[in-house]
Image (tube, grey):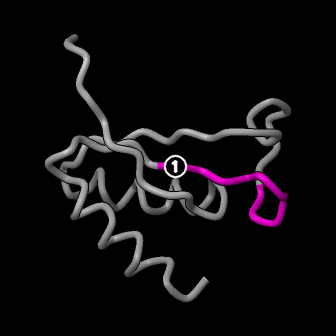
């Protein structure tokens, strides 16, 4: 498998939201992975209210704009 450069989208307010957006992107045929920093990753904690529980989407550069628009549409009310 060839390594592809990926673009970081986010932060999103937690892994749960990132998984929701990732599912929609995958259904559109867009390759996506989720990256998380901080305490949540170290201790396997999930949720949306934990400080530092930000998640990021990693998408191919050609789908960056699509991913950003989808994040805005799905999460602009949060």
Query: Which residue is most to the left?
Result: 62
* SS type, badge 1: strand
Dominant secondary structure (helix, strand or loop) of the stretch shown in magenta: loop
Q: Residue at label 1? A: 56
Q: Would residue 26 be found to the left or right of residue 44 on screen? A: left
**Label 1: few (<14), some (14–19) or many (≥20) C-alpha neighbours in 10 Å:** many
Residue at left offset 20%, top offset 57%: 28
Position above or below: 30 against 66? above
Q: Nearer the viewer, residue 24 or 8?
A: 8
65 vs 75, nearest the viewer? 65
- Looking at the picture, tell me which residue is in the foreground, 28 or 67: 67
**Is residue 28 located in the magenta-colored stretch of the structure?**
no
Q: Is residue 61 above or below residue 69?
A: above
Q: Residue at x 75, y 64 (%)?
A: 48
Residue 72: x and y in percent read 40, 77
- Name which residue lies at 22% across and 11% down: 1
Report the span colored magenta. 47-56
What percent of the width, then of the height, locates residue 54? 66, 54
Please provide percent x and percent y for residue 26.
29, 50
76 vs 28, left or right, is right
Quadrant (top left, top right, bottom left, bottom right) of the C terminus:
bottom right
Residue 21 figure quarter = bottom left
Indicate whether 29 appears above or below 20: above
In percent of width and height, residue 6 lies at: 30, 36
Residue at screen point 33% across, 71% down: 70
């Amino acid at each position: 498998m060839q390594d592809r450069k990926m673009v970081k989208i986010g932060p999103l307010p937690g892994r749960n939201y990132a998984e929701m957006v990732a599912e929609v992107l995958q259904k559109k045929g867009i390759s996506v992975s989720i990256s998380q920093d901080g305490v949540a990753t170290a201790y396997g904690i999930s949720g949306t209210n934990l400080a530092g529980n930000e998640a990021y989407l990693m998408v191919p550069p050609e789908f960056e704009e699509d991913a950003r628009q989808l994040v805005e549409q799905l999460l602009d009310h949060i």
